[in-house]
Image (cartoon, rainbow, N blue to C red):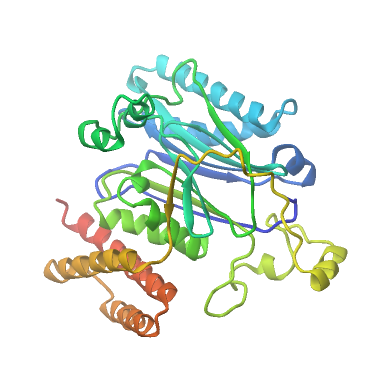
Amino acid sequence: MNWDDIIIDASASDTGMRRQNNQDSHTAVRAANSEVWRRRGHLFMVADGMGAHAAGELASKMACDLIPHSYMKTKAGAPGEAIAKAFRDVSTQIHVRAAANRDFDGMGTTCSSLLLLPEGALVAHVGDSRVYRIRDHRIDQLSFDHSLVWELVRRNHLTPEQANVSIPKNVITRSLGPAEVEVDLEGPLAVKEGDVYLLCSDGLSGPVTDPEMGAFAGSFHPRDASRYLVHLANLRGGLDNITVVIVRIGPWVDPESGEIDQQDPDAKKGKASNGVPRSWKDRLLERFTGPKPLQPLAPEDEHRYRSADCTIGEELIEKLHQLVEDVRETAVSQAWSVDWHQLSEHRRKLAQGQESGNSWVVLREIGEMVALLGQAGRFHRKQVPI
């Protein structure tokens, strides 16, 4: 990758429909200048805390506050060494904090991070918060779940089908909080323009399938995709806190207008993702030769733990459309406070998209209805708790 490559990111986090407080945390730390970029790159992170009282909330916040600070200030060592050390140092600090206060007994957090570096993408993770990559209509899980289910399958004690039926999915085998912790590193991995990376807590990856995450994140601006996905998880129960961070490599081009999104002025003004103006030489060269290509590593050695097609197909559309219709009926019967005029307008546009065979428009309108109903559902639940 290059210092002046355009990178667009957005995030969303929600307590979900059942929890009173949000134990998830997330952060995005961009390199302040080209020198820091060459040495440490950009850092994106999601953490999912655990523990009674406010322990989990504190643990995840410590991870997202202290790991980037420790990583960025470390001058010696390769990025992989530096980020792993930052993870271990924070795990020790969480352990000390928990030992000093009885209320924080059992405090810990998962933590998954994405580093975008000159040599490619590097994933560091502990726990079951996930890092995905969407490329060419496929979604690949780049991180390994440190959970009892995944560990038993890896050791060939159970098949995936047996494990999913008989083993609780929320039992994790590794977290930040013990005095010592092993940090998994993946990469550096090849980066291509158009790649989309998605980091999330299990509050999203539990109720929302990989193909659904890939279809939304790969097809829409990160800001909209984040919004759609969080509300989709809530409409499916929202049993846990939900957090998602989406990072797109390259500018966003709206499929309908064919122009760069008006809400990304840096992309139109020839600025890099950090807001630094690109040189007149770069812009002049690009005008005649096209955008400067990313220079990824050879991808042969990368490991994808799971992979799925995330094309906007009929089966995916039908499944999501049926969910929207079912929730709409619930909203009518329970008298949710919904902007029915706006919902009707989205249904009209969806029908037009179906008639013209434009699956992108259909999915966009489903996403907007999911967001509209999700907001109404959260408001209704607050007024009439179950």
Q: Residue furthest left?
A: 333
Q: Residue furthest right?
A: 281
Residue 109 is at least partly visible in this image: yes
314 above or below 127? below
Is residue 134 or residue 313 the one in the foreground? 313
Identify the residue shown where x is 63% and y is 64%.
251
Q: Quadrant of residue 7?
A: bottom right
Image location of residue 12, percent across then percent down:
44, 53
Is residue 326 or residue 330 the one in the foreground? 326
Q: Quadrant of residue 311?
A: bottom left
Q: How many marks?
A: 0
Image location of residue 284, percent across then percent down:
85, 70
Residue 70 is at least partly visible in this image: no
Identify the residue shown where x is 79% and y is 61%.
278
On screen, residue 355 versus residue 82, left or right, reads left
Identify the residue shown where x is 61% and y is 30%.
83
Image location of residue 138, percent across then percent down:
48, 55
On screen, residue 7 versus residue 155, left or right, reads right
264 above or below 63? below
Identify the residue shown where x is 48% and y is 37%.
143
49 above or below 200? above
On screen, residue 39 versus residue 383, left or right, reads right
